[in-house]
Structures are given as structure tokens and as C-alpha cells.
Image (spheres, helix red, strand yellow):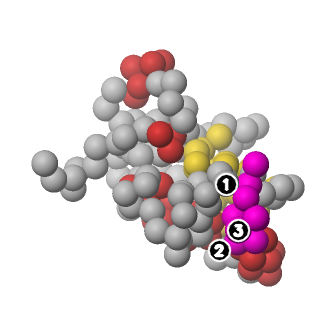
């Protein structure tokens, strides 16, 4: 269940989203403050994603926006999960912005979608992350609980 401050913040975000969204981002559903679906497409000419539309599922916890939402790609009808070195075949996205270390409460649904659009735009490798099959088969954690190792982490 979403707390009052999370619901208030999501209500403001929904008002803004309903009035305008950047090109390539479409709100599909936001029936409650727990789960929203948005479609995104890459606007720039990237042959890996040209003509494709991808569906994102946002799940909000009671501590949003202090904690990040859980964001995954979902396969739905003709919406595939994009091939990308940081997107697992089950839709889990390895993006520091979505983790507790990279998240900031100034981020919002729109900025997350734009970051993912940018991530796709800049991709030139038609591949999954290393160990995709093993990760998908063995992972029992929710995306927000996975402790990804980012290349810019220091020891």
C-alpha cells in the first residue's frame, strides 16, 4: 500500500503526465498509485529498436519517492523486451538510477522513462547481459533488492 506522501507525489506526477509527456513516452494505465504502465520508443535512428514500442511497468512502494520505484520491461502482445547489454530477458533493468545508490527523490516517472530511452538510443550491441540465462533462471529477488555491480563502482 502506498503511503499518503507517496500518493500525494504520484498524484502530482500523474497530473503532469496527463497534460504532457516527452515524445516517445505514452501512459498506458495508472489506475492506482501502486502500478503504472507506460510505453516507450526510441526516437533517434537506432536500427536495433526502429519501429519498436516497449512496455515499462512501474511499481511504487510506500516510501516513494524516497526509494526508487521498481521498473521492469514487460512482454505484452506485440511489445517485446528490448535486447540490450543491461536488460535481462525477464525485463529486469540494470541501471544505477533504479537502485538505492543512484536514486534521488528529484527523479520521477518521466525522468526514468527518458533515462531508459537514452540508454536504448546509445546502445549498439544486440545482446543480453553476461549470464542472462543463469540470472533469469536463478533470480528470486525483486529488482529493487538486487545488488548490481556497476562498472564505475570502486572497491
Q: Residues within 10 Å of mark 3 (few under 14, many from 20)?
A: some
Residue that numbered label 1 is attached to: 62
Q: Is residue 38 above or below residue 91?
A: below
Which mark sits nearer the N-terminus, 3 or 1? 3
Residues at marks 3 and 2 touching, judged by CB atoms closer than 8 Å:
no
- Seen at 45% across and 19% down, the residue is 138
Residue depth check, mark 3 versus mark 2: number of the one nearer the observer: 3
- Seen at 73% across and 59% down, the residue is 3
User: Residue 89 location in percent, x, y?
Assistant: 50, 32
- SS at circle 2: loop
Give the CA distance from mark 2 to mark 1: 29 Å
Give the CA distance from mark 3 to mark 2: 29 Å
Is 71 on the left or on the right of 100, as rendered? right
Q: Residue furthest front?
A: 4
Residue range of the region highlighted in magenta in the rendering: 1-10
Residue that numbered label 3 is attached to: 5
Q: Quadrant of residue 149?
A: top left
Q: In the rendered image, is residue 75 in sight?
A: yes
- The reply to whether the magenta stretch includes residue 6 is yes
Q: Main secondary structure of the magenta part?
A: helix
Nearer-the-camera pick, 48 or 72: 72
Q: Residues within 10 Å of mark 2 (few under 14, many from 20)?
A: few
Q: In the rendered image, is residue 47 in sight?
A: no
Is 31 on the left or on the right of 127, as rendered? right
- The label on residue 23 is 2
Is 33 on the left or on the right of 140, as rendered? right
User: Residue 2 location in percent, x, y?
Assistant: 74, 55
Q: Residue furthest right?
A: 31
- Seen at 50% across and 30% down, the residue is 141
Which mark sits nearer the N-terminus, 3 or 2? 3
Give the CA distance from mark 3 to mark 1: 8 Å
Amino acid at each position: 500500500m502506498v503511503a499518503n506522501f507517496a500518493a500525494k507525489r504520484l498524484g502530482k506526477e500523474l497530473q503532469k503526465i496527463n497534460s504532457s509527456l516527452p515524445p516517445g513516452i505514452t501512459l498506458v494505465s495508472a489506475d492506482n498509485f501502486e502500478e503504472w504502465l507506460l510505453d516507450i520508443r526510441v526516437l533517434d535512428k537506432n536500427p536495433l529498436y526502429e519501429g519498436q514500442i516497449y512496455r515499462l511497468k512501474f511499481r511504487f512502494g510506500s516510501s516513494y519517492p524516497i526509494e526508487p520505484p521498481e521498473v521492469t520491461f514487460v512482454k505484452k502482445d506485440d511489445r517485446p523486451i528490448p535486447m540490450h547489454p543491461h536488460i535481462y530477458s525477464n525485463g529486469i533493468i540494470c541501471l544505477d538510477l533504479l537502485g538505492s545508490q543512484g536514486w534521488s527523490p528529484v527523479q520521477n516517472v518521466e525522468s526514468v522513462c527518458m533515462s531508459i530511452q537514452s540508454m536504448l538510443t546509445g546502445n549498439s550491441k544486440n545482446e543480453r547481459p553476461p549470464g542472462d540465462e543463469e540470472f533469469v533462471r536463478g533470480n528470486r529477488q525483486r529488482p529493487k533488492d538486487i545488488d548490481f555491480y556497476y562498472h564505475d563502482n570502486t572497491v
